[in-house]
Image: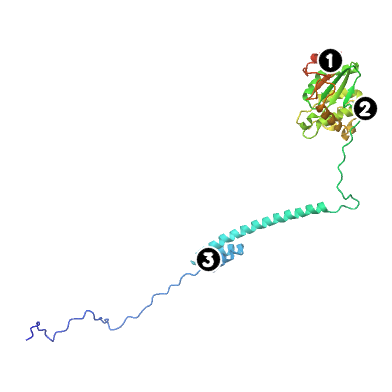
Amino acid sequence: MDNTGPDVPRDQPSPPNPYQPVPPTGGATAPFVPAPFVTAPKTNTLAIVSFVSSFFIGLVAIITGHISLAQIRARGELGRGFALAGLIIGYFMVALTAVLVVLLIVFAAAIGAFFVAIDSNSSSPQSGSPTSSPTPEAPAPLPTGQLGAANFDAGYLEFGTGAVIIDEYVDPMCPFCAQFEQTNGALLAAGVDSDDITLRVHSLTFLDSRSQGTNYSSRASAALTCQATLNPDETLTFLAALFANQPAEQTTGLSNNQLADLVPGPISIADCLDSGDYEGWSQQNTEAALTKIDGADIPSVAGTPTVLVDGVHYTGSNTDLAEFQAFVAAAF
């Protein structure tokens, strides 16, 4: 008898081995079925074309880019990034090309104008024309001597032969001169007619700069000088007409024709005035008056009107006839 354990009947089956593989039931093996094959979406060809061509031909990139975006939406293809990049770069290249073309046209036009200017300046003159530029005309020589009532050497217009000498410095555009003339002009003319005084009129050009570039003071002074040489007996009448029709400062003043129309007397001053012969003389007289006055109690003319009676400066009112009349009377 074995004492190591109970006896196991030998005819009983052995317990199943848990590690033994179990054969499939049914007697047949199930067939192997592979999983279905899924194809990945492809990249749109035109999107690639758009991106590549954008670096070279912007217009092609724009056209293919728009077409590829439409195909990508319809087909579900890849490549949207390429298409968008091609469009952006394409539009930029087209804009850059347009700017460069405009700049090139402007540059070409400027170069063309430059060479045309050079050619016109260096072109040969026509046959018979002078080869050098014309020499500017020299200013007309200033008049000298005496003509009519104009004493060119002394620098004034002279009327009457009286013992008392009155020098009247005026500017045709000066409003204070017009006041003095309207107040005292008739008194001075009467003194000339009676030969009680010698009136010397100095018509100056201080206010040329206030006639918008027409030099009205010079032209009106020249008109007065023309009248003194052509119609000396009517000069003081013309002087009164100048101040009666005086233009305002900062205007163009009267034209030469309008000045000539104011002139009394048998001879027209139109041609004399248009020649401009006496404008330079009036301007010279202005410079002399600003520098020095000989035989007077003032060194020079500081403004207009300036009136001297036998060299004594009248400083009274321009509009007080009695005051000026008394000042003149004191000189007799």
Q: Where is residue 91 in the image (x, y as percent from the top left)?
A: 59, 59
Q: Which sits earlier in the primary sequence, circle 2 or circle 3? A: 3
Q: Pinpoint residue 11: horizontal percent, then vertical percent.
A: 13, 86
Looking at the image, residue 85 lies above or below residue 229: below
Residue 176 percent across, percent down from the top left:
77, 23
Q: As displayed, is residue 93 above or below residue 29?
A: above
**Disc number placed over residue 146 in the picture, else none:** 2
Q: Are marks 1 and 2 in contact (CB under 8 Å)?
A: no
User: Which residue carries the number 3 mark?
Assistant: 71
Q: What residue type is labelled 3?
A: Gln
- Judging by the rendered image, the residue that carries numbered circle 1 is 328
Count neighbours of disc 3 (C-alpha within 10 A) and say few if under 14, some if 14 to 19, many if 20 or more: some
Q: Which of marks 1 and 3 is in front?
A: 1
User: Mark 2: which amino acid?
Assistant: Gln
Residue depicted at 78% across the width and 54% down the height: 116
Number of other residues with Cα within 10 Å of mark 1, as a class: few under 14, some 14 to 19, many 20 or more: some
Q: What residue type is labelled 1?
A: Val
Q: Which numbered marker is on residue 53? A: none
